[in-house]
Image (spheres, rainbow, N blue to C red):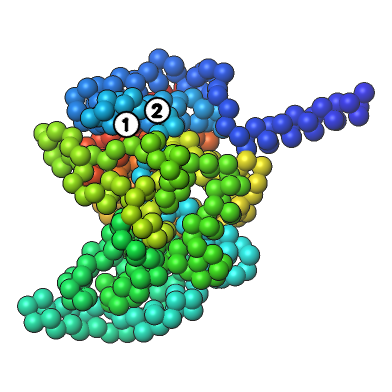
Amino acid sequence: MKKTSTLFLFLCILSSAFAQQQFKPAANAAAAGFSAERLARIDSFFNAAIKQGLAPNAVTFIARNGQIVHNKAYGFSNLEKHTPAQTTDIFRIASQTKLITTIAVLMLYEEGRLFLDDPIYKYLPEFRDVQVLVSYDKATGKVETRRPKTRPTIRHLLSHSAGIPYEHPMDSLLNGKTMIGLSSLDAVTTTELVKKVAQRPLVHDPGAQFTYGYNTDVAGRIVEVISGKSLSDFFMERIFKPLGMHDTYFYLPPSKANRLVELYAKSRLEDPLTLHSDISNRTFPIAGKQTLHLGGAGLVSTATDYAKVCQLILNGGSFNNVRLLSRKTVDLMARNQIGESNVWDRNDKFGLGFQIITDSTRYGDQASPGSLTWGGAYCSEHTIDPTEKLILLVFTNVSPYAYYGDFVRKFRVLTYQALQ
């Protein structure tokens, strides 16, 4: 009898551990600690936003303790064709790519193939003599630089404290060309992008402050150099296939091209939603030369696929019965890496790969302090709340988007107000 009881207890523990490795629908909202009546406010919000022309569509994903309590689609993936949105729709996730690249770097870190405080030039020699910008006279083209007080490192890249911005005051001097953007239909590569980045002086000493930019794209190139694989192949072999992420790519296979949502723009709240004017941004996942693997911005995905990455972090580094990172490495990711600096005006910190919501946040609303969040320029965002064992994601594709802040933050508010 004692053996039977012990075996039963073991099987219960084993079953509980495995349950966290796969999503399953909650029996009902209350079983996952939510009010069904209050969750319905999410439906009201998105239905109203779409009716008012504030958004073309939305896909949500909310899970607590691995139990899905809300996974719905609203609106239309293509307004012109009046195509109803589906939860399986594929979105451009832009900067949400950064967390996946960070995971890739940390997998190599755990294998002893790099240190986070290794200087970038150890893997990318073009950064050996990188300088810091002191002054720049646009009229004369005169530039003054100096040596950095410390070399930029991989840690600086993953925390956006290397001094590498997106827009740089000297871009106009670099062969008369601007930097490669979030997308391109031309035969350009990350190697070319990284060389352009290395030509520009840093805008401040590494570690001095948070400056958002091409940092994770450079980190993605380091993954390629160390692994000997393209970033696309590394992601597919080491992350996507193990996690069961079947709809996440740099470039979509033809069989899935029809699931890519259309891209819209809404520069002002009073403006109607219109097709994005840049054909590259609209079509790069399914057209062009498809040679650019940007670790900071290049992926497309579904809300369900990306939820697996969020649950991996919440689980301390494992999902789908595979472990990609140790729990101690995930702990490291969630530590403040930018000192007294803040993420813009949000009063939050940045770890390795995501923003850390603080007690005094001006952005995270009711999310527990220590929650982890980030989004993408085309309007997609996730929040991982370890205290509540909760993940929440909302995706659409509009850029520029005057309603971005309301879209993502009101969804988060509506999620938390439904907790019992």
Asked whether residue 96 appears in the rendered view, the answer is no
Report helix, strand or loop for mark 2. Answer: loop
- Residue 83 location, x and y as percent? 31, 26
The image quarter containing residue 215 is bottom left
At a point 40% along the width and 28% down the height, the residue shown is: 86
Three-letter code for the amino acid on which mark 1 is drawn:
Ser
Q: CA distance from mark 1 to mark 2?
A: 8 Å
At a point 39% along the width and 80% down the height, the residue shown is: 126
Q: Which residue is mark 2?
A: 86
Report helix, strand or loop for mark 1. Answer: strand
- Residue 78 location, x and y as percent? 28, 31
Using the image, determine if residue 307 lies above or below residue 153: above
- Residue 218 location, x and y as percent? 40, 67
The image quarter containing residue 203 is bottom left
Q: Which residue is mark 1?
A: 77
Asked whether residue 201 appears in the rendered view, the answer is yes
- Residue 260 left/right relative to 391: left
The quadrant of the rendering that contains the N terminus is: top right
Categorize mark 1 by other alpha carbons within 10 Å: few (<14), some (14-19), many (20+): many
Three-letter code for the amino acid on which mark 2 is drawn:
Gln
